Image (spheres, grey):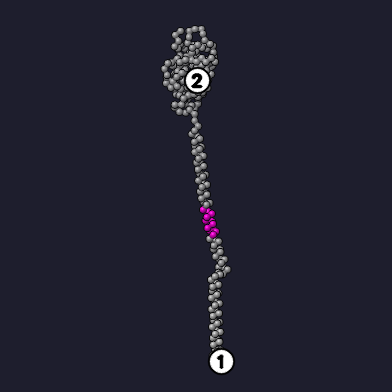
Amino acid sequence: MRKNLIRTTAMAAVAVTAALSLSACGGETDSADASPSPGAAQSADQGQEADGGAGGNAEGSGPKSTSAGADSGGSTGGSASGNTGAADGGSGGGGKGGYGQACGTNDLTWSAKSESQAGGYILISVKAKAGITCMLPGVHPVVAFGSDGTEAGPAEQAVGEQVKLSGATTAYAGVNPKTTNTDDGKELNEIITSVSRDDRTDPVSLTTGAITVDRPIVTNWHTVPQDAVPGNGLDSD
């Protein structure tokens, strides 16, 4: 009886010891599952830092590339505009370089000389200045005498052809300062003239020498000096 009790007690102790052993093993397993080792945790942290760094670099490089593209595009656009702008600026400069541009008084070089033919008259000559091509109207120039507003009337009733002036081409107009047979008139030594009544540029003053002015006349513009002889005008006195 006593032996059975001892055996039973021993078996119970063995069972308790086995149970305690199993419980300890289970706790260690759970603890291992719940808390990773310090080495594993450190490796995981390094991996996350690496992933975060790579992602940050990728995001950082993306905007930088876009910004560079925008900067490049802006620079190109500015350069083109400047060139255009530069190209527009070169084609806008100008002057009278083509057919159809009306001559202004200041576009021409002027001269006047006295002629003895047909009782005497003044021959006006004009040329276009260097680099200018322009058209003279087929009418007479404005010719004024003195400060009292005396002007030469037309020696020709019809309108003539326009005259293209460029280079050495010369146009002529003849002025007869006195068409009357009287002793009346005023003594002058210059005339004031401009291309036509439509011209708005300043007139020029031309020295002629001593002349007597009374009911003066002037021809249209001509390319041949002989065609610019004014004659005695329309006065019958």
Query: Does the rendering let one see residue 24?
Result: yes
Residue toward you, 23 or 85: 23
For label 1, the crowd category at 10 Å Cα-Cα, with few meaning under 14, some 14 to 19 and many 20 or more, is few
Q: Which of the image's four quarters has the N terminus? A: bottom right
Q: Amino acid at mark 1?
A: Arg
In the picture provided, is 223 more to the left or to the right than 55?
A: left
Residue toward you, 25 or 45: 25
Residue 60 among magenta residues: yes
For label 2, the crowd category at 10 Å Cα-Cα, with few meaning under 14, some 14 to 19 and many 20 or more, is many
Q: Residue furthest bottom?
A: 1
Q: Position of residue 79 (x, y in %)?
A: 51, 42
Q: Residue at x 44, y 20 (%)?
A: 138
Q: Position of residue 167 (x, y in %)?
A: 47, 25
Q: Say which residue label 2 marks.
A: 194
Mark 1 falls on what kind of element? helix
**Majority secondary structure in the magenta region:** helix
Residue 2 numbered mark, or none: 1
The CA span between labels 1 and 2 is: 159 Å
Residue toward you, 140 or 200: 200
